[in-house]
Image (cartoon, coloured by chain):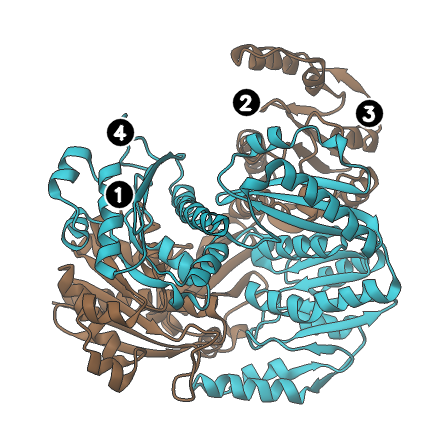
Chain colours: A brown, B cyan
Amino acid sequence: MIQCSILTIGDEICIGQIVNTNAAWIAAHCSEIGCEVIAHSIVGDDSEEIKSELKRLSQISDYVFLTGGLGPTHDDVTKKVLCEYFNDSYIWHEPTLLWLQDFYARRGRPLTERNKLQAFLPSVCEVLSNERGTAPGMLFQKDGTIVVSMPGVPREMMYIMEQHIFPRIEQHFFLQHQTRNMYRTLMTIGVAESDLADMIGDVSKFLDPHSSLAFLPSYSGVRLRIGAHDVHTDKAIEILNSLEKILRQKAGKFIYGSDNISIEKTVAQLLTERGETVSVAESCTGGKIGAAFTDLSGSSAYFIGGVLAYSNTVKVQELGVKSEEIEQYGAVSEEVARSMSQGVRHKLQTDYGIAATGVAGPDGGSDEKPVGTVWIALSTPSTTITKRYIFGNDRAANRDRTVGAAFDMLYRYLKSRNDDNSGN
Amino acid sequence: MIQCSILTIGDEICIGQIVNTNAAWIAAHCSEIGCEVIAHSIVGDDSEEIKSELKRLSQISDYVFLTGGLGPTHDDVTKKVLCEYFNDSYIWHEPTLLWLQDFYARRGRPLTERNKLQAFLPSVCEVLSNERGTAPGMLFQKDGTIVVSMPGVPREMMYIMEQHIFPRIEQHFFLQHQTRNMYRTLMTIGVAESDLADMIGDVSKFLDPHSSLAFLPSYSGVRLRIGAHDVHTDKAIEILNSLEKILRQKAGKFIYGSDNISIEKTVAQLLTERGETVSVAESCTGGKIGAAFTDLSGSSAYFIGGVLAYSNTVKVQELGVKSEEIEQYGAVSEEVARSMSQGVRHKLQTDYGIAATGVAGPDGGSDEKPVGTVWIALSTPSTTITKRYIFGNDRAANRDRTVGAAFDMLYRYLKSRNDDNSGN
């Protein structure tokens, strides 16, 4: 197995001003091609801390990827640290100098002395060209470990990884006939993590040291990530196929897709395939269901619009909810949710109408309808489905879970229609 | 100075399937209250690696914050690791057991044996209640270092930090009379970062080694973060007051609030004070403006509802936009935005109507109206204001910037009305 680690350098990352998307990108891509990512670390722009972490990570990794600290200002120290760490001295690197002259000439800007210093590089490193910026990557080798230093600008780092590093790692696998990891993710919806775990049962019956299963929960469902570890490519695919088969036998009815496809995207595909349209009537979500539909480009093919009926007046005037229904059952009720979904479906002449009304919190709950109580309704050409949920105390979470539940309801209906048709 | 570090646990973070937003949040908030964040580290769900990193970080930190690995399934190992690391054994923690019984009862779900295990906790830890989930936080103390373990679900981690940890750190500063960093953030809207920088001018004239100023741009405006560094609390407040005074003199008319108050919250306060109401007519944002209004609890006082007019049919039928307007000017035009805002204001009988129509992208642009073109309109009792924006190529960013611009427009109008009144 090829093992790698990631060392991110920069005060702005350390104090949380910037989220470390570079490390996630490198880790995801290294994992995808089969390396094991064993550690990430972040340190500020401090020479001693950088050296200490570089030493620690070098001892446990085949590759250490460094990002950040290669800019032209006083607080960028990475190059100096690497030169000291590898007991090296600087030389002028001619190809980089030519690149810089060209880079600035094309932009009509002068090549200043400060900018020229990007070509003053440690003599032992292999220089990795960076066609998206002025700081090249640097590759060092010592005691069997490869240390790669890259700029922190995401698209420059990505260029260097894609052009120089991933091909080298593929070669590394090939030449050394190395084993690897491989992953697949199965997406579930409409089932709690613990219920899913009970359904799947004792994992030791089907896992061994070369296979794994992880549960990754979110508000829109639990992802099941299966893994094959430290095996050759053919064997890895065989393991993943076998694990997927087992999980589909145990929990197949909750699995809606694989490899991180969202439930929104899945519903969008089903609606597009069927040439059908949808509208929304939102109370407690205030627009979040519509926002989720329209996050996807191309959503105008199936998403027509909706009514945000936050006040009861709007529910009555725009959606045809009867005042007596609200008086008798309350605005958060099966009856009102049903009328809202039917009302918006008729008003906007869509195939489906989805409605949500609930007590998002933190106030407004009662003994009968505590905070977190939500009614969701789906009106279709033939019927109206309703379901009550009782979520928690947190307003934002309740709203997010309502969106997830609304997509779950529509997904199940569309899926059952597709299954009916394919059965005929 | 109190020093802290962050240890994130989980294969899904290590392999880059999830971006580590938890670490950024903790780092940002710890920095804000005055701690120095000195290191972050991520390891997979591996007992030995967790212990080794916990040991390393404990040696250099006053606080080590762990997130992740507290779920109910087999791949969650953090609790076991901590129990071993602190040479501890488990006990049944009664308050947590009662909380779990209540938690599941309220949801009408059974408390399974697996879920009950969340109350089986190391005996020496201080249990930190988690009202947003089933896994409590755990606080350990050893050799002067405090180790806090929290669930990886962001809202649950945030609850524990806000309820239990930040107050404790404040006490720590107070009792030990430590020097600290302290920050304040002034929120601006409606001005570009570079224009703001020109307005503020040469910062060396008012900054010294114990003070700082950072520009933090986002889609809804630029935040100015002023800082006082390595001084006692009284002195820190004095430095911040003096910096705030200088910045308000230079750029006061763009500053709408301080300390991360959102423009949405500011607008909500103004509407509530004035006893006025608002409705929305959304095309390209598909519900995001309504969602932003209703993110705030209490929004029913001023947010009445709206129409999601994603298709042109809805714009015509529900908002009274004339078909000829769409034919002549296009759906993305000043005329259509104006009609949408007036239409929703009249239909829902609100004081204000806000409309947005635009080319969110990635497709649908033309030479005349490139991707990123957005018209926003605000209809008021006396007038209708319109404004065109040309944002960029990214769909999600364009939608977020449209929401920010809509709130900016309403904020300015409400502010000018308040200023008029106070001047009379």
Q: Can residue A294 be seen here?
A: yes
Labels 2, 1: front one: 1
Q: Residue B333: x percent and y percent?
A: 25, 37
Q: Can residue A8 be seen here?
A: no
- Label 4–label 3 contact, CB within 8 A: no
Residue linked to disc 2: A131
Is the residue marked by circle 3 packed among few (<14), some (14-19), or many (20+) residues within 10 Å? some
Q: Marks 2 and 4: same chain?
A: no
Q: Quick check: B85 left or right of B358?
A: right
Is the residue marked by circle 1 packed among few (<14), some (14-19), or many (20+) residues within 10 Å? many
Residue linked to disc 1: B337
Residue type marked 1 = Ala
Camera-side residue of B293 and B370: B293
| Residue located 44% across and 63% down the image | B272
Residue type marked 2 = Glu
Chain of residue at mark 2: A
Q: Label 4 vs label 1: CA separation?
A: 18 Å
Q: Quick check: A44 left or right of B358?
A: right
Q: Label 2 vs label 4: CA separation?
A: 30 Å
- The numbered mark at residue B22 is none
Labels 4, 3: front one: 4
Callout 4 secondary element: loop
Callout 3 secondary element: loop
Q: Label 4 vs label 3: CA separation?
A: 54 Å
Q: Marks 3 and 2: same chain?
A: yes
